[in-house]
Image (cartoon, grey):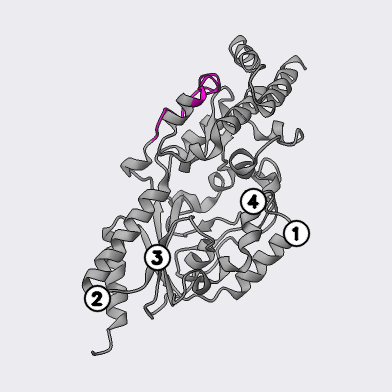
Amino acid sequence: MSTPDYNALAQRIRKLAHAAGFQRVGISGIELGEDEAHLLDWLQQGLYGSMEWMARHGTLRARPAELLPGTLRVISVGLDYGKDPDAAWANLRAHERAYVARYALGRDYHKLMRNRLQKLAEVVQAEIGPFGHRAFTDSAPVLERALARNAGLGWIGKHTCLIDKHGGSWFFLGELFVDIPLPIDPPASAHCGSCTRCIDVCPTGAITAPYRLDARRCISYLTIEHEGSIDEALRPLIGNRIYGCDDCQLVCPWNKFAKRSDEPDFRVRNDLDNASLVDLFAWEEDEFLRRSEGSAIRRSGHERWLRNIAIALGNAPTTPAVLAALHSRRDHPSPVVREHVEWALRQHQA
């Protein structure tokens, strides 16, 4: 057999990726030595909170060929989900309403991204024959932002999100590990300069230095990953954010170039971009599970959902509806929910 034209194949893969609906695509090698050192330092400082899997996987996250033996290249893709920043700010200022991170307003992106990546692999396989591959979308120990940076999709900003100078940071990442020696793309250069807006705006001071995030103070971690009680000192700072936080992206000047997505799966469900805290607090577990089917918000579980909303209600204006909602959960079976409800009631008594 003649040697394949890998340059032509790489170009074909890019065209197929765009045809599959991805706005960004690039190819990188698998060497992540500096990023591995950064990861190990972050882990040694305990900045991952209770996310034990981060420490458990250790260096595997930075070694694609150990995660999938035979891997030679990583095809990184990006899918826009950009939302209206003005609407987001308005929601944050409306303290009686709930704020949900923009990525979680619609359908869970994981399945959509994996399906598209798998179909991309199948089309390539139909053209060149069988090859080793595996699709990932935040579903395995992968340093996806470092790989995407090396593939030219963007640079890692001071808030640790990936930024594309032509499209901001409102996009999902996915990867296709392959055993084909494709030509690699030049890595993206950094363009944060002296800007510190993301650091300055963080409500809880979780970005402790450029490119250094303390998950233990991050609202996204606290409202989604963290189980149990949330530090009382942090509760007033959470405001009305009940699932995730976008402040560091909302202030990023590069997001003026972000593209709004009309992907049907990313359209808002359950009126979550305009829902009142009182209404969401009334969801019983069966309603929560029904409404969160196929959504990222199911990850929090009903107990954490109520805990987060109780905090937001404690930070909301004192109204009869807010007080009635909190009193309705004072006898909730969960001690975590009861604790945060009592804290919220004390806030209003004060």
2 or 3: tag closer to the N-terminus: 2
Return the mark for residue 128.
2
Looking at the picture, which amino acid does disc 1 mark?
Gln
Residue placed most toward the observer, 130 or 253: 130
Q: Residue at coordinates 25% horizontally, 65% vertically from top-left?
A: 123
4 or 3: tag closer to the N-terminus: 4
1 or 3: tag closer to the N-terminus: 1
Give the SS element for disc 4. Answer: loop
Q: Residue at coordinates 31% horizontally, 81% vertically from top-left?
A: 6
Residue 269, quarter of the rendered image: top left
The residue that label 3 is drawn on is 134
- The residue mark sitting in front, 4 or 1, is 4
> Residues under labels 2 and 3: Cα distance?
16 Å
Location of the C terminus by quadrant is top right
1 or 2: tag closer to the N-terminus: 1
- The residue mark sitting in front, 1 or 2, is 2
Q: Position of residue 183 (x, y in %)?
A: 38, 80
Give the SS element for disc 2. Answer: helix
Residue placed most toward the observer, 102 or 292: 292
The residue that label 4 is drawn on is 51
Return the mark for residue 45.
1
Is there any visible trace of residue 223 in the rendered image?
yes
Looking at the picture, which amino acid does disc 3 mark?
Arg
Magenta-colored span: 268-285
Looking at the picture, which amino acid does disc 2 mark?
Ile
Graded by Cα atoms within 10 Å as few (under 14), some (14 to 19) or many (20 or more), the crowding at tag 4 reads some
Q: Residue at coordinates 55% horizontally, 72% vertically from top-left?
A: 63
